Amino acid sequence: MNRLLSASIGLHGAALGAAILAPGPRRGAARRWALATVAANQAVLTAAGMCPRSRLLGPNLARLPADLRGLVLSFDDGPDPDVTPRVLDLLDAAGAKASFFCLGQRARAFEDLVREIARRGHSVENHTEHHYRHFAALGRAAMRREIAGAQEVLTRLAGRPPRFFRAPMGLRNPLLQPVLDESGLRLASWTRRALDGARHCQPEAALRRLTRDLAPGDLLLMHDGNCARDAAGRPVVLDILPPLLERMRALDLPGLSLVSA
Ligand SMILES: [Zn+2]
């Protein structure tokens, strides 16, 4: 358990002890102190969970070692029957590998696409079963169901168990890390993201976000599922991926998957 969680448990115990054991005349003040302490601690834990790249709640891969010969491309929320095959073709044409953080529910609907991602040498990783917006508010059992459901179907289709997990929108709570530990998964966030899942995402701005200070070890996030559309109705990821791959080629930075990195 990391130091913040250990300290939080200790703090809760101390607050409870003070509230119960304080002598009669001081009990009111002790209870107010205990409540304020617990509330402040909860605020710190919540804030840590709302920062996708934070390591305060446990290990979190936001960047790979800078001596890596290349960078990692990752795609979330798929597979998507319209977008994923075109992303795969663009990657193949550039000789690049990537990691696909798939949803269990979508994998069940498009099983052949998951098999195809794996067949072409990319890694299939876990992004929960349903991508609930309230994932960070779930209890331990519900988190376990969301992760185990996706892990089961993705393992069956990809032929190997996912090794990395990305939380929906990167948001989580302190209960996630023990579930990841028992599932054999590592949390992965990102170095920079395109924000191409947001409505009204401009391709030029998304590409600038991704390529600013492009460097070995970067872990970049785009979307093949739930991807925004440009003014012409085309998925933004298909606008930004070709120039990104071209920039990587010019800088001699091969695209890698998390497993091949
Ligand atoms: Zn997502």
Image (cartoon, rainbow, N blue to C red):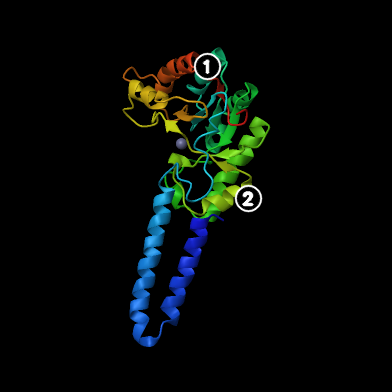
In percent of width and height, residue 4 lies at 48, 56
Q: Are marks 1 and 2 in contact (CB under 8 Å)?
A: no
In percent of width and height, residue 211 lies at 41, 23
- Residue 98 placement, left or right of 196: right
Q: Amino acid at mark 2?
A: Glu
What residue sits 42% from the left and 28% below the top?
227
Sooner in the amino-acid sequence: mark 1 or mark 2? 2
Q: Nearer the viewer, mark 1 or mark 2?
A: 1
**Residue found farthest to the front:** 67
* SS type, badge 1: loop
Quadrant holding the N terminus: bottom right
Q: Which residue is labeled 1 in the image?
A: 252
Asked if the beta carbon under badge 2 is closer than 8 A to the nearest atom of ligand 1, the reply is no
- The CA span between labels 1 and 2 is 38 Å
10 Å crowding of disc 1: few (<14), some (14-19), many (20+): few
Residue 86 visible to an observer of this rendering: yes
Asked if the beta carbon under badge 1 is closer than 8 A to the nearest atom of ligand 1, the reply is no
Which quarter of the picture shows residue 169?
top left
In percent of width and height, residue 36 lies at 35, 67
Q: Amino acid at mark 1?
A: Asp
**Residue found farthest to the right:** 159
Which quarter of the picture shows residue 123?
top right
Please say if 35 is above or below 193: below
Please say if 34 is above or below 62: below
Q: Nearer the viewer, residue 127 or 95?
A: 95
Q: Which residue is labeled 2 in the image?
A: 182
Q: Nearer the viewer, residue 248 or 39?
A: 248
Residue 229 visible to an observer of this rendering: no
